[in-house]
Image: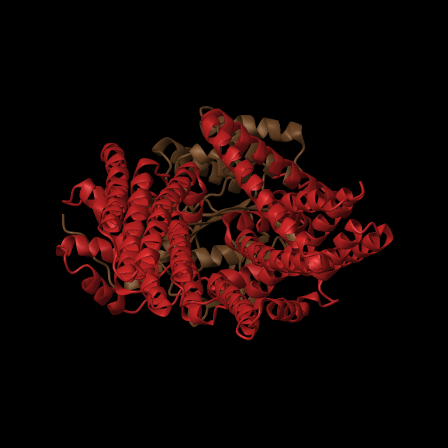
Chain colours: A brown, B red
Amino acid sequence: MCVAEGKSDRTSPTAAGRSVTVSLQHVSKSYGTQKAVIDLSLDIYAGEVLAFLGPNGAGKTTTLKLATGLLRPDTGGVTICGYHLAREGRQAKQLLAYIPDQPFVYDKLTGHEFIEFTREMYGVPPETARERLASLRDRLAMDGFLDQLAETFSHGMKQKVALAAALIHDPKVLIVDEPMVGLDPRTIRVTKTMLRDLAARGGTVFMSTHTLEIAEQVADRLGIIHRGRLIALGTLAELRALAAAGGRLEDIFLHLTDGRSDTPAE
Amino acid sequence: MTIEEPVERSAHRAAVLDALVLARYRVVQWRNALDQQLRDAPVRTFVVLLLLVVIWAALYFLLKTIFEQISRWELVAVVANKHIFVHFFLVLAVMLAFSNAVLAFGSLFGRDEAAHLLSMPVHPRQVLCIKWLEGMLLSSWSFMLLGVPLMLAVAKNTTVAWYYYPLFIGHFFGFVLIPATFGLLVAWVVAMWVPRRPLMLLLWFAALVLGVGIYYLWSFSREAAQAEQWLDLLFREISLAKNKLLPSTWTAEGIVAAIERRVGDSVVYLLVVLGNAAFLAWLAINVLGRTWAEAYSRARQGQIRPRVRRAWFTAGLCELLFFYLPGRLRHIMLKDLRGFARDATQWTQMVIMLGLLVLYATNLKRLPVDLARPETKTLIAFLNLSTISLILATFTSRFVYPLLSLESQQLWLLGLLPTGRTTLLLVKFLFAVTMTGLSGVGVMALAVTMLELPAAWATLNTLLCFGICVGLSGLSVGLGARFPVLGQRNPARIAAGFGGTVNLIASMLFVSILMTGVAMLALAELKHGLETLQPLVTLTPHTWRVAIGLLLFSGLTAAGALWIGGRHFERLEY
């Protein structure tokens, strides 16, 4: 794996002096004979947004699920804020929030009831949650549907409710798979801001995305996974240097995953 | 402003809170679902409840009749009751264990909710407790639908004391805990050690149990000659089910003790059942609690499907079966045929149902009846046709009815094809007729051959069977188009909805009307045949006219249902 170290091109945190909140060490995972993740090691820091990129079937979702404890690695281990995910799962998950690519909301609960359910499961005091929910409700424009049954929600509505439920307990680590899918442009802007705010307050965001522009705008560091291996990790500038390719992330991504860079004909 | 530290809770308080929160929000979900049902479809809810009452009442009268018949055999009544209970609870145990295993696997290792809960800081044992209780609640259908009619039917035929009722209820509920918990453990074992194709494994297991049961029944039926010998042999053979280590035996003994006013014995058996149930539940919840995350991970790991090789078999079969259709429509058929072949839940159920019929048909000559008599042949032929029809009605309701609803998520794809919607409907109908026709008529042909029916009567039975296939297929496709369940991917849920229930009732009604016609036709023909001393060899013109009338009725039923469904389907937006 080639990892570029060095300066980043925005005022983002560096490795020195910050705590590691998410650590995957020599993690591998196979589905039968198919190797989904191969010897992946990755540290993510407090106050950082790390975006995971990769072609379809590269192992992004598997890596995220390994980081949440939904999948057990065949080798290696995962820690969240120092808690080993397999041995101290409950303590780790108390600090964690996860939003899958297909957000889950109980069909027969309203959006509000689902958020309340999450609040109670995480033990957030009602007064604290009330304030947070009011802010989230306003920022994500959920007033029109929050009191309807979730089975009537579109994908974008479910995404909003899932995001609100994930943030209601102010997690230290937010793991999110394709956070912007199905959201309107305004909500995408709001979501990007919310992810940056979480990082600014010392939290960690570990996200996967196919939308390279969003990764460029939101992430402090970018990781590129290809055929189960982490082939690149660093800031945008570091990846440019690594790929010896100037220009946009798209070119860097294609260069690193395909070994060539194609500029579309204009 | 930095992120606040999470709230600290004592371990015990946190565990209790998790269970309470989960339970509370389950109740909220049920309440919301009920409110929605009553608000959006009050008539539908009422009809479903009414049908449940009808089925309940039918079961009660059936059981009452059985017990009345048995009580006439005074000497065997006492023994027979115990055997009935033992076998009833044994069969119930197998059914509950299987159904709970399937439900538990989906709930704990399959659905999105499991992933959601596992990503939260929940106490696994608390979640499993709630899931286990849900399993119990789902299993309680067995008490409402089967246990209550049984309890009342026994009380109707025997003088029982007041404590019989609470003891029966206690025994029943105590009993259902065991197979339900066993099902939970089976699901765990499958997830941990055999995660690939779990449903296929469970279905093969069910087929194995069924095979053993069939062999068990067949092994004693082939030896008995006289009625008394048959009964003795029956009791001797089925005494294997009375093993003292089986919970079904404890429950049966306890209930019989309650009937016979031996309160002490009944209570002892109840405590044995409850004690074992409690231990099994404790074991299951603790074992699963410790390993749920691991089992989930293994189960998800096993979900990766192997590559599907070039499906030349289904392509060839489609070419053979639907040669008369244009290529474009044949490709739509091929899509449905592959969907059917690749869904194990569909074809294994069909194989099991038809397999039983084939087994029965090949053993017709072993029946302890005089098959040379025309009356016997006619009766058995009628029963064969009725059985095949009822099985086909169940099959079309379960598998054919949901066909159009399952297309709803990609209806736009079909809708944009240069093919009319009515054509699509007809394609579904032809697909259904072909599948049901091949299987139903095939089994019917085997049965009439084994019965050695005269050619004319055999032809008539086979034609009528085909007519039933046409009628049932038309009903299911037509009503499936009239009452589609849009956006639902689960065929079982589609079939269990309002439209599915209407279809099932309509199918049963259709079969009843047709079989009444067949019965009258058969009786008339038999009477004529006995008068002319040539029973069933040649059929009267009247018989053929009635048969043609019945076939026309089938055709019109299919056409009518398709027309109704087609009109609605044409207007469906996608």
Q: Is B230 displayed left or right of B47 in the figure?
A: right
Residue found at the far right of this picture:
B264
In this view, B29 is above or below B248: above
Q: Nearer the viewer, residue B105 or B43?
A: B43
Task: Determine the residue positioned at 32% across, 66% down.
Answer: B308
Residue B264 in view = yes
Spot occupied by residue B150 in the image (x, y as percentages of width and height): 65, 47
Residue B195 in view = no
Spot occupied by residue B520 in the image (x, y as percentages of width and height): 36, 47
Q: Locate the C terminus of chain B and report the quarter of the image it occupies.
A: top left
Residue found at the far bottom of this picture:
B223
Q: Locate the N terminus of chain B and report the quarter of the image it occupies.
A: top right
Spot occupied by residue B18 in the image (x, y as percentages of width and height): 68, 43
Q: Nearer the viewer, residue B370 or A262?
A: B370
Q: Nearer the viewer, residue B557 or B276?
A: B557
User: Which quarter of the figure has residue B61?
Assistant: top right
Q: Is B444 displayed left or right of B134 in the figure?
A: left
In this view, B56 is above or below B350: above
Task: Determine the residue positioned at 59% across, 27% down.
Answer: A131
In this view, B555 is above or below B284: above
Q: Nearer the viewer, residue B512 or B50?
A: B512
Q: For the image shown, how many numbered marks are present on the structure?
A: 0
